Image (spheres, rainbow, N blue to C red):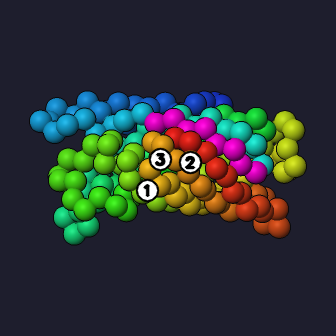
Amino acid sequence: METNLRLPRTHSKLLPATTGLLLLLLASEAKAEPRKVYGMLDLEAREGDYLALEPGAYYLLGAPTAVGRPIAFFARGEVAVAGSGAGIGLMVDQLSDDCGPYPTPRDLFFSFLVSLEARAERMYGHTSWNHTTYVGPQFTFALVPAILPKVSVGWMINPRNAADNHVQSGIGFGW
């Protein structure tokens, strides 16, 4: 007798729900420390998906004593003209000398930030790329992101066809 065990198609809904729950739990820590989870918003023009709106949140990990600069973990979604996606990564402030044990958003947004992000994008609609899912790293550099544009460069790879890969550069505002 053959059985066909299939999982419900809820796996695509579990990741955003789990991420949201994790961020809520981190934001509601019952410590005397300042709030550590903050919202972020970015608008970026780039190759492949043309124009993307990227809402998300970042969690300030603090300033390691060896470095003295704020480090943050972030997660964000993406809605674009020719695709949608998500990413997670780390960003580091490169200018702050010492922000103390509890950095604030001002420590990040009025400085020079560098981030490394793991991204996944699904392309659809009008695009020169194939209509498939791409994954890859992205580096982002922003000098005073509250005022000046940020620049990003990534390498997006089709996991089903390694020959289908693209360098993706972009410019945008926000973080």
Gap between marks 2 and 1, in whole Å? 12 Å
Q: CA distance from mark 1 to mark 3?
A: 8 Å
The residue carrying mark 1 is 113
Instruction: Report whether 27 appears left or right of 171.
Output: left
Q: Which mark is residue 59?
A: none
**Residue 71 or 144: which is nearer the viewer?**
144
Kindly identify which residue carries mark 3. 145
Question: Magenta part of the protein: which range?
Answer: 40-47
Residue 124 location, x and y as percent? 81, 39
Quadrant of the rendering where the N terminus is positioned: top right
On screen, residue 64 above or below 21: below
Q: Judging from the image, what secondary structure is the residue with disc 2 in?
A: loop
Which residue is labeled 2 in the image? 149
Circle 1 crowding by C-alpha within 10 Å: few under 14, some 14–19, many from 20: many
Looking at the image, residue 151 lies above or below residue 14: below
9 falls in the magenta region: no
Residue 21 in picture, x, y percent from top left: 40, 31
- Residue 43 drawn in magenta: yes
